[in-house]
Image (tube, grey):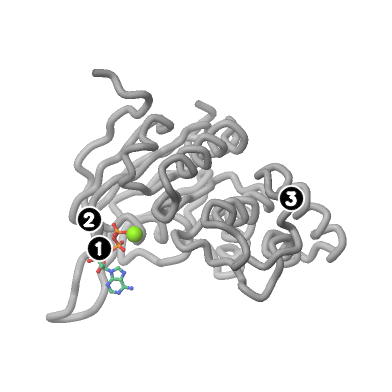
Amino acid sequence: MAGLAVKAHELIKWFGEGEAKTYAVRGVSFEADFGEMFYIEGPSGSGKTTLLSLISGILRPNSGSVLVDDKDIWSMTSDQLADFRLNKVGFVFQDFHLFPRLTTAENVAIPLILKRRDWNESMNSAMEYLEIVGIKDRANLPPVKLSGGEQQRVAIARAIASSPDILIFDEPTASLDGDTGRRIVEFVKHNVLNEMRCIIIVTHDSRIFEYADRIMKMEDGRILGIEKGGPHEE
Ligand SMILES: Nc1ncnc2c1ncn2[C@@H]1O[C@H](COP(=O)(O)OP(=O)(O)O)[C@@H](O)[C@H]1O
Ligand SMILES: [Mg+2]
């Protein structure tokens, strides 16, 4: 391992007030390292998506802290936080969040254009990332013309286009058939993971557990334990 990527300390997040107050995350601490595939597993409603939002700078915790690459993200200024979200983390959302009116290549170029890169240069980089994920031939099509697995690859290409240190996936295989799901995760493990990156995957798909280095189990906003992943041993 090449060091600590994410350190979450006593994170608490609730929604609503008074009678309607519900705790989504109830005191979660964990550490994930560069060079590892770190899974978070648990039933629906256990707080997984909320936890991902807290560690990726999308949602502010009610208490607790998040260090990414040794920086306390929730004590950053809003400019620093925006910079962090653009450059440090790549987030692949459960339902992909592709822009329907843009082509596949334009979808991938978006973060680069946000980084104030020139349009042509951004589109050229986008094409390189589409080649990496194996769908360069789909570059000029809108997302609606692509299969679920192809849309997932576009989302991955977009997330890795800005070379983030931390790549976060929320239920990446939920809308894919088993084989496509395994191929995507295997692809990420072999082509995207390196000692400078940490990949965090939320899933309850046991078919992809074999690619995990560690699996953290969550239930009802709490951590039940962390175990080693890898191929099944009977
Ligand atoms: N924006 C929100 N407003 C109110 N409640 C929410 C919100 N987001 C999540 N919750 C609640 O927090 C709990 C955890 O949700 P979530 O993090 O989405 O779980 P998971 O991803 O494990 O299914 C659930 O009870 C959910 O209803
Ligand atoms: Mg969720």
Question: Ligand 2 within 8 A of label 3's CB?
Answer: no
Q: What residue lies at 39% left-to-right and 53% top-to-bottom?
A: 174
Question: Ligand 1 within 8 A of label 1's CB?
Answer: yes
Question: Ligand 1 within 8 A of label 2's CB?
Answer: yes
Q: What residue lies at 64% left-to-right and 56% top-to-bottom?
A: 158
* Circle 2 or circle 3, nearest the eye: 3
Check disc 1 and report its element: helix, strand or loop: strand
Q: Which residue is mark 2?
A: 221
CA distance separating discs 2 and 3: 40 Å
Q: Which residue is mark 3?
A: 136
Numbered circle sitting on residue 24: 1
Amino acid beneath label 2: Gly
Check disc 2 and report its element: helix, strand or loop: loop
CA distance separating discs 3 and 1: 40 Å
Mark found first going from the N terminus, 2 or 3 = 3
Where is residue 90? Give x, y as percent.
56, 53
